[in-house]
Amino acid sequence: MPKKYSIYQLIAISLVAALFILYPDITWLPFELRGLNHSDWINHVYFFVFRYISFVVLIFFLVRINLHKLTTTLFKQRVIYSTLIAVGFYAVYGFISFLIFTRVRHFGSLVLFQFFMVSILTSLGGHIIILYHEKRKKEQQIEELIVKNLQSRYDALTNQINPHFFFNSLNGLTSLIRKKDDEMTLDYVNKLSDVFRYILQSDKKGLITLNEELAFADSFRYMMEVRFANKLKYTIDIDPDALNLRLPVLSILPLLDNIVVHNSIDSDHKMNVVIQTNSENELVVSNPVYPKLTVPVTNGTGLENLESRCMLLTNKSIKVENDGKMFTVYLPLI
C-alpha cells in the first residue's frame, strides 16, 4: 500500500498540476484581456480563477483517490474510474460556467481535452506509484526470505559443532578422571563449562571480533594442554591492530579440534599449533601433520562447515594448504 500523503502535499501537487494543465490558457490570457472594458476584464479574470480552482479541486480528488483509495494494479480499471469522475466534474463545471459566466466557448473541445488529460495523468501517476510500492514490497519480502534462509542455514551449521565438540571433550575428561587428579579435573571442568557457555550463546551472534574469539580459544587451549600434558602447545602471535577485525563466531574451535582429532599427539609427535595474523588481514592457523594410523570417524563438520559459514557471513572463502608436513588454514578477517 502506498504511503499516505498529507493534505498539504496533495494541495501542493494539485496547485502545480493545475497550472500545467491551464498553461495554454495562461499564455493566451493577456491577449484576451487586451481591449476589454473594466467590467469585462474583471469578469474574465474571475472566470479564469474559477477555471483554475475547478481544476485544482478535480486534480486534488483524482490524486487522492488514485493514491489512497484505488489499490488495483490494472491500469484500465484505474483510467475508467478516473474518467467517470472527470466526466462528472466536467458536467458540473459546464453548468456553473454557463449559469454564472455564460461562457459556452469554455465548455468546448479544449476544456474537454484538459479534463481528459487530467484523468489520464492522475491515473498514470497513481498506477506508477502503486507499481513502485508493490515492487518495493516484493523486494523487501525477498530480502526477508533471504535473511531467514541464511539464518536457518547458519544456525544449522552452528548446531553441528556442538555434538562434535562435546564427544571429543568428554574423551579428555575421561582420561583425567582415570588419572584421579581431582584438582586438574576440576579446572578442566570449569574451562569446559566456559567453552560450552560460549557455544550455547553463539546462536545469538554472527560475526565477532578476533579478540573475543581468541579469549574463547584460550579456554580450549588450556583444556588441550592439560589433556596432552607437554605434548601439545600453542604459539599465538597476533597483530594488536587486527584484534578488532571480525570473523564468524566459533571459527577457531573446529580448527583446533580437528588438529587433535586427525593427528597423533604423543612423546614422539609433539604438536605445536601456531596462531597468527598476516599482512592480508587473515588469521593463520598452522600445525605439523602427524596422521593417525587409523583414519578417525567424524561427523563431517570441520572445514566444510567453517567454509560454509564464512561464505554466508563474509562472502569470502577460507584457504587451506597441506604439503604433507604442515597443514595451514587461512581465515579471512573483515
Image: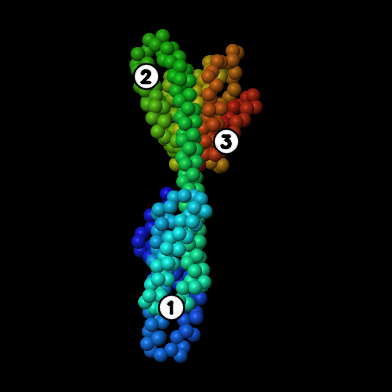
Q: Earlier in the sequence, mark 2 or mark 1?
A: 1
**Helix, strand or loop at mark 3:** loop
Left or right of residue 64, residue 238 in this image = right
Mark 2 in CB contact with mark 1 (< 8 angstroms)? no
Kind of residue at badge 1: Arg
Q: Nearer the viewer, residue 204 or 63?
A: 63
Q: Is residue 329 visible?
A: yes
Q: Residues within 10 Å of mark 2 (few under 14, many from 20)?
A: some
Q: Amino acid at mark 3?
A: Ser
**Numbered label tally:** 3
* Residue 180 horizontal/vertical position (percent): 38, 10
- 264 horizontally vs 50: left or right: right
Which residue is most to the right? 323
Q: Residue flagged by tag 2: what amino acid is it?
A: Val
Q: In 3D space, how far apart are the residues under numbered discs 2 and 3 (Cα atoms)?
A: 34 Å
Q: Nearer the viewer, residue 114 or 221?
A: 114
186 is higher (above) or lower (below) than 284: above
Disc number for residue 180: none
Residue 202 x/y as whole percent: 41, 31
One can see residue 275 in this view: no
Q: What secondary structure is marked by label 1?
A: loop
As helix, strand or loop, the secondary structure at mark 2 comes to helix
The label nearer to you, 1 versus 3, is 1
Q: Residue at x 43, y 78 (%)?
A: 103
Residue where numbered disc 3 is placed: 317
Looking at the image, is mark 1 or mark 3 earlier in the sequence?
A: 1
Q: Which residue is mark 1?
A: 103
The residue under label 2 is 189
Q: CA distance from mark 1 to mark 3?
A: 78 Å
